[in-house]
Image: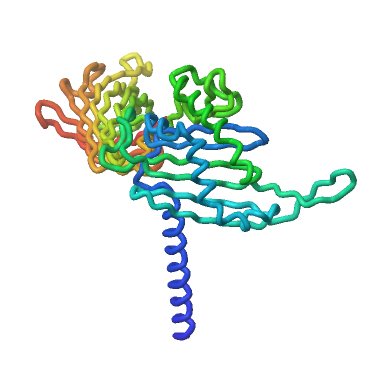
Amino acid sequence: MKKTICLLMLAISITANLCAQSNKSEKAFEVPEDIVINRRFIISLDKGNKVTIELTDINDIERIANVDSLLEVFLTDITGLKDSLADPLTSKRIDYITDAEGRKKIRFQQFQAKGASFLINNGELASLRTEQDTINIISVIDNPPKALDKISLHRARYYHLTFYLNDISELNGYGELVRQKIHTIQTHINDRWPIVLGSGNHYLKGEPSIVSGAPKGFVQGSHGDFLVLNFMVNVQNYKNYFVPSFSLGAKLVLTNRDRTFKWEPGLFWEPHFNFARDLQGKLKTYRNDFLTLTYGQGGIPDHDPRKDFSFSAVLSLGYLVHREGEYFDKQTFRLGAGKFAVRKTTIEPSLYFNNFFKGVTPGIKISQYF
């Protein structure tokens, strides 16, 4: 039994080691995790080929405007792989990285097809390759131009070109075409970007071969500071009453340049509804409105400020601005502190009080975001 346990522990240790080494190897040929990509463009070429351009800042596009020269250097540097590229039935991937010191790293991978595909031409059966080749060209930008976007002031800036080709040999003919497309982006980036019907993407007006996930090439969550409109349905207890309400308002999302931390001040209108029968026995609704200031702050996951985050501090302060019935005392405040969130549902402890913490009543507010 002890031998079995030891063998299992050894196997787990070896597996964990291999996974860690594999992850480290992958990251060595990727844009570092702490670098935020702010712009992304997808350019369709011909024959189903395409290239994706990713940039830390839109002004960095001028550094790849001479893309034909960059591709010439790349093709020269991979000359030694000529024999490895010869197999027409395997798909290939080349990762080509240039660091801040100008040192270059090249990784070549070759993949066999999972199944066999064939083409019948003039009665003859020929093998057919269905997977495209991938080329990643990543480089640090030396002495970058002044940034236009809200980005880190101390981290390096990168460009990342990804070519998806039917065959790597076709790359040699695309330098001039890609250069023209980049010039079009530079010249017309502030033109209209209509939506591509049937998808969430947008294309540059007059140039449908240039597509992005958002107008002007913005990546999701890359705008930095923005305003969010919120609608919530709430329920809370007040004394021995069960009080439904809703919240309608907005939050301003402010992020740091590294996109690792954010602050969220907000303002909401919150009508509370109480129900009771009047002297005639008719059911009547009493509405009591609170105007509520909120504040939250915390870390940002995946450099995307639109994602939910773990609050390091969250507060809310509401004041009764409209009163009906005798449910709430005049000049009532509601103070909330802390918040437990499960997806779009939050639970917030709160205190109702008036006249500077007289008549204090504890409560729990449960909210559902939409």
Q: Nearer the viewer, residue 287 or 120?
A: 120
Q: Position of residue 365 (x, y in %)?
A: 30, 35
The quadrant where residue 190 appears: top left
Q: Residue at x 25, y 18 (%)?
A: 325
Q: Nearer the viewer, residue 165 or 284?
A: 165
Q: Give above or below for 89 relative to 320.
A: below
Q: Residue at x 66, y 54 (%)?
A: 86
Q: Residue at x 43, y 68 (%)?
A: 17
Q: Position of residue 330 (x, y in %)?
A: 16, 20
Q: Position of residue 207 (x, y in %)?
A: 56, 22
Query: Residue placed farthest to the right in the image?
Result: 123
Q: Nearer the viewer, residue 54 or 8?
A: 54
The quadrant where residue 24 appears: bottom left
Query: Residue placed farthest to the top in the image?
Result: 280
Q: Nearer the viewer, residue 232 or 205?
A: 205
Q: Position of residue 119 (x, y in %)?
A: 80, 47
Looking at the rendered image, the quarter that the C terminus falls into is top left
The quadrant where residue 317 appears: top left
Q: Is residue 364 visible?
A: no
Colour scheme:
rainbow
Left/right of residue 127 with respect to residue 273 in the rendered view: right
Q: Residue at x 49, y 38 (%)?
A: 69
Q: How many marks?
A: 0
Q: Is residue 170 visible?
A: yes
Left/right of residue 299 with respect to residue 105 in the rendered view: left
